[in-house]
Image (spheres, rainbow, N blue to C red):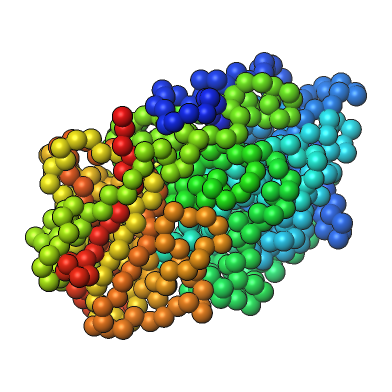
Amino acid sequence: MKIVRILLPALVGALPLSAVRAQASPFADCRPMPSDTALRASLRSVFIPMPDGTRLAADVFLPNGLATGRKLPTVLTATRYWRAPDQSQANPQVLDWIRRGYAAVVVDVRGTGASFGTWKYPWSRGEVRDLGDVVRWISTQPWSDGNVGAIGTSYTANTAQLAAATSGRPLKAVIPRFMDFDAWADLTAPGGVINSFLLREWGKAVGAMDRNTPSGNPPRGVRPIDGDSGRALLAAAVKDHEGNPPLDEISPRAIHRDDVLPEWAGSSDDYATFRWREPIERARVPIFGWASWYDAGTSNGAISRWLTWKTPQFLVIGAWSHGGGHHASPFLAPETATDPSSASQQDAAACWFDRYLRGGTSGPAPGRIWYYTVGEERWKSTDDWPVSGTKQERWYLGSEKVLSRATPTGSDSDEYQVDFDATTGTQNRWYTQLGGGDVVYPDRAESDRRLLTYTSAPLDRDVEVTGNPVITLRLTTTAKDGTFFVYLEDVGPDGRVTYVTEGMLRGIHRLVTTAPYRVLYPYHSFRERDAAALAPGAMTELRFGLFPVSAQFKKGHRIRIALAGADKDTFGRVPAEGAVMWKVSRTGGAPSYVDLPIVERR
């Protein structure tokens, strides 16, 4: 549910199945088929008719001067963010596909851009049916060899993935990058905490697009269909979009994932990509998944898809901004070049489609995960998750604000008055969702003064944390509801505090329930029937996962757990007003602790 330009995904070189292996680059085995850099693209903007009569606007790119009778495989992207501005040229990614021997098709999904219809919510059943019809239309065109691959980043990653549910045989492979496997839990309301920044700004942006409000420099609207010189067809399509709901106004009203919003005629459950498991498993379309430790919860979703869906999959998880344009390791300077480079990412994407659409043999094969360890700054690969050698190591929130392996023996608690001005800034893992900007967490030493922190002694060895940390908090609060944020941080010998990962939970959603897909942390349904107010002054247990990460804490550094009750620049305040006091238990009978997934290396 994000606005980014269409980017090509990266693929990872396959290795023989084995234990975890450290590698210099995930792309060593990628050798794409030769390209013709002199080729230029021709463009036709056409309507694709749907069975119900709705017309979808599409840009069809072919090599200039394509010989009669020559047929090509096709790369499809279906977008909610305008397939192109009016009078614009082919973007570099589209031209790259043409030069590599593919046709390219970019479609405005139903109710957006220059397409007719209405758009009620992301990835509706009608939108997913349309994807199959678009793929079949492509496969019957005179320039098509019948083979289609779907690719996308962000919103278009979900359309690429969901095309596998309805497209049938023509769809041969998909590359969903930075996809929302469970958008409620990993993006719009992580831990049940409303991402008010994203819902507000994203809703405003797509609303302006639906009205065809010109943007850019020079300002332009969406590209019309060929022959629509008077823009009458475009005006009629935009008129249809008046039925699209104002997301910035209605989305924050849903505090449970099953709250039915009349403007949607449904709930957040209706756009959950994980619910399409059965038809996607039947299709067995090979998936190359792309995610980041520092892009909202895309890594959570990618790991759950890997663990749950019985489909051919290859997965890469790096330290990137949304879309992979920036290196986002918090241990490196913000200007660090992305790894691998954008050119390598494009080559790797071609290797994946070459394999499944053109009979290529290089590049990755399904069955392996590549992941990047920050702090160590190394790529590794594995065929198991959790990775081989992982064990849970329990660290307690102890006396004198010490994080310790020793079980508490006393009976005490730490008071904390929630500071509602606490923030992780405006370049965090959530802000990158709007535009793919760099993820930057400055030294958090000063920010932590607003939080309740527990810090270990200096480590006597390097420690690798890979997976989902899990926090267990036992506390009392003076409020009937609240938001509970937990940060895992690295404290260097010089006192610099480096963000590593985070997790959060809204108090009313604390009940642990059974997950609809496989997870490696306590799952919360976020449904109305499972919600319950907190009892002020009564001991409450909160158990929840932090977002997964792979990070090395170096010898001499210290591990810190920091607790907060707000992240004011990103998430909605709960409660809306008034002071709130916590008492965090650290008694022997009811300790608070974090379980860290530690990987032991031989």
Vertical position of residue 534 compared to residue 214: above or below:
below
| Residue 416 in view in this figure | no
Q: Which quadrant holds the C terminus? A: top left
Residue 210: image x %, image y %? 65, 59
On screen, residue 543 versus residue 214, left or right, reads: left
Q: Quadrant of the N terminus?
A: bottom right
Residue at 69% in and 25% down? 354
Up-down relation of residue 326 to residue 501 (above or below): above
Q: Position of residue 436 (x, y in %)?
A: 47, 44
Give the residue at x 22% y 73%.
Answer: 582
Q: Tell me if I can see residue 64 in this picture.
A: yes
Among the 4 quarters of the image, the one containing residue 217: top right
At 60% across and 75% down in the image, what residue appears? 261
| Residue 528 horizontal/vertical position (percent) | 51, 78
Percent position of residue 234, x then y: 76, 54
Q: Which of these two is toward me, 128 or 544?
A: 544
Q: Answer left or right for 20 relative to 204.
A: left
| Vertical relation: 570 (above or below) 280 | below
Quadrant hosting residue 522: bottom left
Total count of labels: 0
Query: Residue drawn at (15%, 55%), measured in percent from left and top?
Result: 406
Q: In this view, does 125 lie to the left or right of 248?
A: right
